[in-house]
Amino acid sequence: MSTFQAPKGTYDLIPPHSATYLAVRDAIAAPVRRAGYGYVETPGFENVELFARGVGESTDIVTKEMYAFETKGGDRLALRPEGTASVLRAALQAGLHKGGNLPVKLWYSGSYYRYERPQKGRYRHFSQVGAEAIGAEDPALDAELVILAHDAYRSLGLRGFRILLNSLGDAKCRPVYRAALQEFLRGLDLDEDTRHRIDVNPLRVLDDKRPAVRSQLADAPLFRDHLCEDCRAYHAQVRELLTAAGIAFEDDPTLVRGLDYYTRTTFEFVHDGLGSQSAVGGGGRYDGLSEMIGGPALPSVGWALGVDRTVLALEAEGITLELPASTDVYAVPLGEEARQVLFAQVTELRRAGVATDLAYGGKGLKNAMKSANRSGARLALVAGERDLAEGLVQLKDLTSGEQRPVALDALVDEVRKALD
């Protein structure tokens, strides 16, 4: 055992479990790639101010959970706690919005970091796949992103998730709701920190998960009762498009999520099989974020889906993904000459697109065949001096046990036929 272990609240992804994570990432990415989203990758750390402005200085993410540090050169940086601000920054820096083809559609995948109390489904290092549509205000985009996430989960076999939907209004109607909410909250029995939030960002109080706070919020004013006509009509269109696409959702007038940049459409995917950490992903519209970080007005919408949480949801539903074997063919050389010949054949098979491995380390036949079976390969190639003298290799089906000789110069074609 190593002297060192992964830091508290983090994890290592190692085979065979890591194959499930890769499959989940691919499944989430597949629908967005078909919808015209291009891949973007940003640094693992950014300027602290990007998140302070974008995510919100009053949020727990910025005030309590962000890993911030100062470099030797005096720069104030932070490990990225979420993806949207970084992706929008990258799009602005590259001038993607100036190409005349809006919205700019981007998707990403990576690790994110928050200093939280570790528990099942909540880690200090976690993996997400996200999608952002930048530069267009259109309810069809909001609906598109919800549908893409829904279809990704369905493609994995998940059925036990629910979609929660709300609208957080815009710059016209939010101040009216904010004032009504502040008046209500000031009449509650709250601790000093929570009372401070009433003045800074009262929506954060609605997102408080503590029972002592939640029990007092039952009669809190609802955003839907304060939406302006434009926001009401916009939200109605999103709902109509989702319904027409056969997407079941639940209106949740208390849904605010934990980031300051959301406007209008807000949604969350929850799975009741995950206990207290039920959210597997979510997102919404963030029409003012570009201006917050120094860019032009670029109304946008996006989401992030948790790979870790999605894997837990699969486990909760008892779903085991059908993953392709990492090895289709396992070569077993008997002797030095056979090792050289089979090594060359392994290389040719790999170049021909066949997943192939070799028994390394001079293993005897018995141990090498055990390794072949453990590899998950369907076929084994076995060759000794007598086989090679005749220009042959023994091709063995590891499921049926049937074995037959094949010519070396026809090996690639014979292996392909056997795998079909």
Image (cartoon, rainbow, N blue to C red):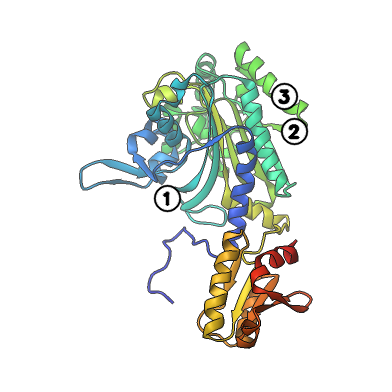
At horizontal 73% and vertical 55% (from top left) the residue drawn is: 317
Q: Nearer the viewer, residue 94 or 418?
A: 418
Q: Quick one: quadrant of the C terminus? A: bottom right
Secondary structure beneath label 1 = loop
Q: Nearer the viewer, mark 3 or mark 1?
A: 3
Among numbered discs 3 and 2, the one appearing first in the sequence: 3
Please name whichever residue, 255 or 268, is drawn nearer the observer in this view of the structure.
268
Calculate the distance from the C-alpha at mark 3 to the C-alpha at mark 1: 38 Å
Q: Which mark is residue 81?
A: none
- Foreground mark, 1 or 2, reads 2
Task: State if disc 2 and disc 3 touch (CB < 8 Å).
Answer: no
**According to the image, label 3 marks what residue?**
241
Which is nearer the eye, 89 or 122?
A: 89
**Residue assigned mark 1:** 115
- Residue 162: x and y in percent read 70, 40
Q: Position of residue 156 (x, y in %)?
A: 70, 49
Amino acid found under the numbered disc labelled 1: Tyr
- Callout 2, which amino acid? Ile
Q: With respect to residue 1, does 75 lie above or below?
A: above
Would you call the spot at circle 2 few (<14 residues within 10 Å), some (14-19), or many (20 or more)?
some
Task: Name the residue that disc number 2 marks.
Answer: 247
Q: CA distance from mark 3 to mark 2?
A: 9 Å
Give the side of residue 377 with respect to residue 257, left or right.
right
